[in-house]
Image (cartoon, rainbow, N blue to C red):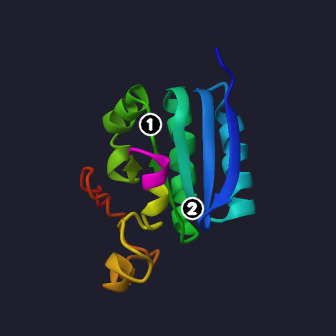
Amino acid sequence: MRPLEVTARSENGRAVVRLRGELDIATADTLRRGLRDARRDHGDDLVLDLSDLEFMDSGGLSVIVACYKAAAAAGGGVALAAPRPVIRRALEITGLHRRMPVHGTLREALAATPDGDGEPAGSGAAARGAAGSPDGGGAPNTRGAAHPDPA
């Protein structure tokens, strides 16, 4: 089993968190600490680079969901980038692909605005008044992916 490595950097005003290895119940705390530190150091708009993530179980998924909820409550969000087919399948089975934008590449994720609408800042859903939601950001728009779950 390959241990989980979590690294974070800031890019385009967002925290890019790279996951490498295997994410399971044994490594979930490593991810939890890495995401907490990334939010503290780089802000609440995160892109998780999953291109080198080889495996993820329900323990890992729960850490990502908790981060998504915390970031959204703070006015930010979480986007997922470049999941391998086995990881993408886990996201689809659990329905997470309807809650968080999933992009084919890190470049696509960084090009999309943090609310996931793919439009330049100051246009799109935020400029059209999506601020009616409790967190002021509206539901993420995942063009090219399944429609977000309203719950």
Q: Please tell me whether mark 1 sits on a helix, a strand or a loop.
A: loop
Disc 1: which residue: 83
Q: Earlier in the sequence, mark 2 or mark 1?
A: 2
Query: Who's the residue at 39% across and 54% down the image?
Result: 101
Give residue 67's position: percent from left, percent from top: 57, 52
Please check the rendered image and state whether residue 147 is part of the magenta-colored stretch, yes or no: no
Quarter of the image with the C terminus is bottom left
**Where are the magenta residues, as a range?**
104-108
**Amino acid, disc 2:** Ala
Residue at the spot 40% in from the left edge and 26% down from the top edge: 86
Q: Is residue 94 left or right of residue 109?
A: left
Dot 2: few (<14), some (14–19), or many (≥20) neighbours within 10 Å? some
Q: Quadrant of the N terminus?
A: top right
| Circle 2 or circle 1, nearest the eye | 1
Of all residues shown, which one is farthest toward the top?
1
Place of residue 75 in the rendered image (x, y in percent of width and height, measured from the top left):
54, 72
Residue beneath disc 2: 71
Q: Residues within 10 Å of mark 1 (few under 14, many from 20)?
A: many
- Name the secondary structure under disc 2: helix
**Residue 96: image x %, image y %?**
38, 45
